[in-house]
Amino acid sequence: MKQPLAFRVRPQHSNEILGQDHLLNEGQILQRCLEKKQLFSMIFYGPPGTGKTTLAMVLANELGIPYRLFNAVTGNKKDLETIFEESRFYHPLVIIIDEVHRLNKDKQDLLLPYVESGALILIGATTSNPYFAINPAIRSRCHLFEIMPLKQQHLIAALYHAVQDPRGLNNEVTLKKEAAELIARQSNGDLRYALNLLEIAAIACTNNTIQKEDLLRINPRAALSLSRSDDGHYDAVSAFQKSIRGSDVQAALYYLARLAAAQDMDSIERRLLVIAYEDVGLGNPAACARTLSALDAAKRIGFPEALIPLSNAVIELALSPKSRSACEGGHAAMEMVQQGDFSIPAYLRYTPVGLSEEEQYDYARPDLWPWIQYLPDSIKEAVFYVPSRTGSFEKQLAANYDELKKISRTADLKSLKKRKK
């Protein structure tokens, strides 16, 4: 039984790696590692099928460093201990960990001393965002590198290489241009998926020639891409959000249907949640919770019926009052944070030092809380949130905000406390 095509035609050298020019071009970090013959612990993160594990293996091979593969899900402590024992005979030994974000605490406790001492060089691979999914103990010992989705030209080049490579299809079939382009479009940057589809097509094709019709027969969803440009999918996602933002409910439903026809729940989910909080926001805050409920129902039901709760959410979002005030307020505050570290008033600190009791925040005087200055002194007049006054909910918030603005806030808590309750 042959190994899968995607495994057989794995790159052996760094110049065969596709689509990662930001790491492997002349002067880039991994290219410099190869030139200087040095390697350090790192984590590759990115979509599936983009070559994270393959890149790790290529780096170890080109530098002549032995490596061992370990899967954080299926591997056990005994497997790790075997690798630790081997590290005594190799200086260093590379351990390549797939699904590194799934590494549990027990395995981490065993692994970390070896990584810390340099006995093992850890190269992790994950499809999750390492800033959220990777345990800080692992993350702090590794450099993080994003592995990018492959572009269409990279996928097409890889497909023809697999057809011609003696390890692959060895020119036993011919791949027509329109078939190669269709596979590349369908693969969405995932080379493993593209090669798997190519392998099936090579079995199913007639006269040893892979044509578009063969792909449509074995993968009917491919027909959804035939009338699109290369960027058609992203154009539909963009038009989807803009239609809801522009309150065009008919267009919003049309673009929802296009995405649903491709069963692209991931894009629909991301866009609807962004729209709910960014574009509708405080104009109809209840729509945010209802959008989450609709998405949960859609994922439980599955396509094609998922279109029903999704349509409910889209119609409400499209016809809701729009307010970007919360989104813009958050971004304005972030811009201020990035300008510098403004000192938090002493009376707001968790453990204020050097303040008399009269100068400290009083938990027993809620009547004084609206009169206290909370922003750092140097930016006490800063304004981040500006009400848009759309929708009944934000109109009420704006009315409350207008009343609160009439209050003169102060940092003089000692004087403030002299007020009677």
Image (cartoon, helix red, strand yellow):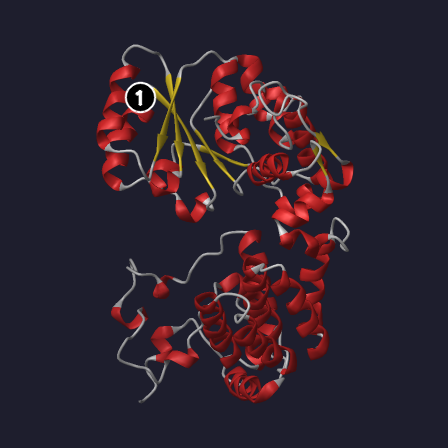
Drawn side of residue 265 relative to residue 369, left or right: right
Q: Residue at x 62, y 42 (%)?
A: 189
Count the marks.
Answer: 1
Q: Residue at x 61, y 26 (%)?
A: 17
Q: Around disc 1, counting alpha carbons within 10 Å, would you say few (fewer than 14), some (14 to 19), or many (20 or more)?
A: few
Q: Nearer the viewer, residue 256 or 174?
A: 174
| Residue 120 in the image, given as x and y percentages of width and height | 34, 21
Q: Amino acid at mark 1?
A: Ser
Q: Quadrant of residue 199?
A: top right
Q: Quadrant of residue 172?
A: top right
Q: Residue at x 40, y 47 (%)?
A: 133
Q: Nearer the viewer, residue 386 or 105?
A: 105
Image quarter where the C terminus lies is bottom left
> Is residue 392 shown above or below 104?
below
> Is residue 307 shown above or below 116?
below
Q: Nearer the viewer, residue 390 or 77?
A: 77
Q: Secondary structure at mark 1?
A: helix
Q: Residue at x 66, y 51 (%)?
A: 222
Residue under pointer 1: 117
> Is residue 287 shown above or below 267?
below
Res. 386 visible in picture: no
Image quarter where the N terminus lies is top left
Q: Quadrant of residue 251?
A: bottom right
| Residue 342 in the image, given as x and y percentages of width and height | 49, 56
Res. 15 visible in picture: yes
| Residue 204 in the image, given as x and y percentages of width and height | 62, 39
Drawn side of residue 25 relative to residue 382, left or right: right
| Residue 239 in the image, given as x and y percentages of width and height | 72, 65
Drawn side of residue 59 relative to residue 90, left or right: right
